[in-house]
Amino acid sequence: MFAIHPPRRSDRLPTFHHQRSLPRLPVPPLRESLDRYLKSLEPLLNQAEEKGGEKADVALAKRKGWADEFERGAGKVLQERLVDLDRTSPNNWLNDNFWLKKAYHEWRAPLPVNSNWWLLFQDDKTIPEDVRQSVPPPGQATDWQIRRAAWLIARLLDFKDKLDRQEIHPDSSRTGMWFRRPALSLFNICRLPGIGCDSLTQPPQRLTPAARSVTVFLKDWAYAVEVYDRDGVRIGVGEVERRLWEVVRDVQQRESKGERAVPVGILTADERDTWAKNRERLLSVSPRNRQSTTSIENSLFVLSLDDHTRGPRASTHPDITRPNIDAQVQACGFGGPTGLNRWFDKALTVVVENNGRAGMMGEHSPCDALIPSIIVDYAIAEHIDVTAFEESTTKWTLDGTNRAWERLDWEVDGTLAKEMQGAQQRAVELIADSEPSQLWYSEYGAEWIKNVAKCSPDAYLQMALQLAWYKDQGYMTATYETASTRLFAHGRTDVIRTLSSASRRWVKSMVDPAAKAASRRLLLLEAISAHNGYTRDASVGKACDRHLAALKWLVRQGEKVPALLGDEMFAKSSEWKLSTSGLSAGTRFFGTGFGTVWPDGYGINYLAGPELVKFGIESKASCETTSTQAFKAHVVDSLRQMRVLFEEDEGRSLPKSKL
């Protein structure tokens, strides 16, 4: 994907060499989108008929009639509006006009759990194992915590510098060609709350103090720590470590004097309109608040130094649960049980607990999680090199004469103090209602799926999730899988509709005791083939969801919504109670995840490694019909059943390995 070790000089291409050659995202032909949409309704209509609803063929014929009427009438008008919109858009019809607003910035739900993604880093083996496995006393920073934080800063900035100098050498693949814009969108950027709709900041001038700094949070105290000098030269990792220790000592001194941090960051965990109003009040109270807020928003990224390590909780499902990893999910994704010591609006937040465990959380709107995963994979590929640090047998002391950091303090009034208390209580309730957990499935992985089953690992895992859902709920549901449109300039995503007539037939066969293994296998292969076809089409701009949604958004006030777009099935077919996304092999990650979109659904991210598949699954504790632990068990059962279909024919015995 990207060459860490550069090729021969004669073969080198600048990082962004292929960017201009990427084509523009097309406006799909209307008829193709209509046909794809109608076909996706078939399993839902058949299911409705089985439950006593209208006959499926009648229901489908009615909607085909609406589609024909739409194509001849309102749809033709809306399609031409979309074509004109595309012609007047700098990049494409979707990203310039709809996607950020409709998918992210108009959504008023709090960012933690609901929108932000998380990545769990592998352990750094330079840190002694007894330290990595420990839960140090709360309230203190530790040597290895600060050292790993400094190392991660250095590695992330090393990648950024190579990117700026165009020394990350692209291959000719779709990822290599597409990388430039989203990679640059992660640093020095922040989401700003607004009434009704949020926005993103523009990157600041490169050599301004905030642009050269990392925002550091410790016990809710905020600091701007310079990591580039005034000429834009990166500070050495040993000096970064020294500056982090100075921040730690400053916090200790302030607390010893009886000072207490003002947890303004918790306001970013609130409902978006509430945070927008509180931010306006915060900025009006004191000019200092504008300085601190702007510094955070313009900084490279946030480093959250947690003065504790989230300990494992007892599990009722020890065979499918890794308590330490699940504890890391809560710490990394949400700020533990409290949501404190975070700034949830920031595009990137590196989290380091006080035993050295680390991960990353990010605001979703600047780019999708694939981009930070590529950057982080580079950052954690090399473990801490102790020789890169200055040797010292004493802790760092404050250097008040020439310090390269500053306090980001706040002045708040009584109203804001109450708002912070309310925001924290709401964050505690939001986090308590989230049930995230990782499933590490080790009985087989992508290599077996490719070499023995001869299937696409992604499509195979999607079918496993379809079967697991049916076991869990007893019916089929509309399913969202992220399709990347990175073949196109400024491409983001579209939808792969995993639920199909083929996948439904296969799932039904798997719960039918009379079905034969050979029939089940054939139906699975047909379902996988259908899924692969949809995936290919979606990746080249031929999915239907973004297109039809844009046409509906183009219906003007006072115009009648066409029957096809106002149909209950139009909404029902995009109730993504199963929201899924595959990321990469993820060998350097302990896990990934995001929250469910629907309160009675599941949010699932997975890493399909050669021998190990890691599922990050989230649901709501308050929902009586879902359970993350139960769903994990269904995933395990489904994967075992699927393996039998491919190994029974060869007379192989199936080992019963523990997960």
Image: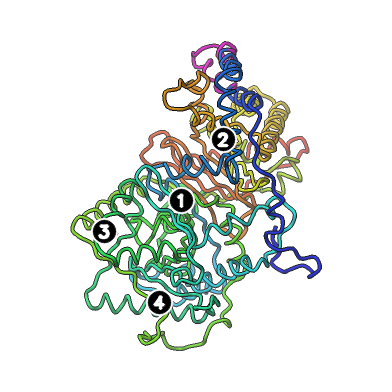
Label 1 or label 2, whichever lies nearer to me, is 2
Label 1 or label 4, whichever lies nearer to me, is 4
The residue where tag 1 is placed is 116
- Residue 566 lies, in percent from the top left, at 47, 22
Q: Is residue 546 magenta?
A: no
User: Of the numbered discs in the image, which one, if any, rests on residue 405?
Assistant: 4
Label 2 or label 3, whichever lies nearer to me, is 3
Q: Please say if the residues under marks 2 and 3 sit with CB atoms less than 8 Å apart.
A: no
Q: Is residue 44 magenta?
A: yes
Residue 659 visible from this viewpoint = no
Q: Which residue is more in the foreground, 400 or 4? A: 400
Answer left or right for 309 relative to 456.
Answer: left
Mark 2 to mark 3 CA distance (whole Å)? 40 Å
Q: Is residue 567 above or below residue 175?
A: above
Circle 1: residue type: Asn
The residue where tag 2 is placed is 546
- Which segment did they paint magenta? 42-61
Question: Quick one: label 1 or label 4, which is nearer the N terminus?
Answer: 1
Answer left or right for 30 relative to 272.
Answer: right
The prevailing secondary structure element of the residues shown in magenta is: helix
Indicate the secondary structure of the residue bearing disc 4: strand
Circle 4: residue type: Trp
Mark 1 to mark 2 CA distance (whole Å)? 21 Å
Question: Quick one: label 1 or label 2, which is nearer the N terminus?
Answer: 1
User: Of the numbered discs in the image, which one, if any, rests on residue 555?
Assistant: none
Residue sitting at x 58%, y 77% = 385
Circle 3: residue type: Ser
The residue where tag 3 is placed is 284
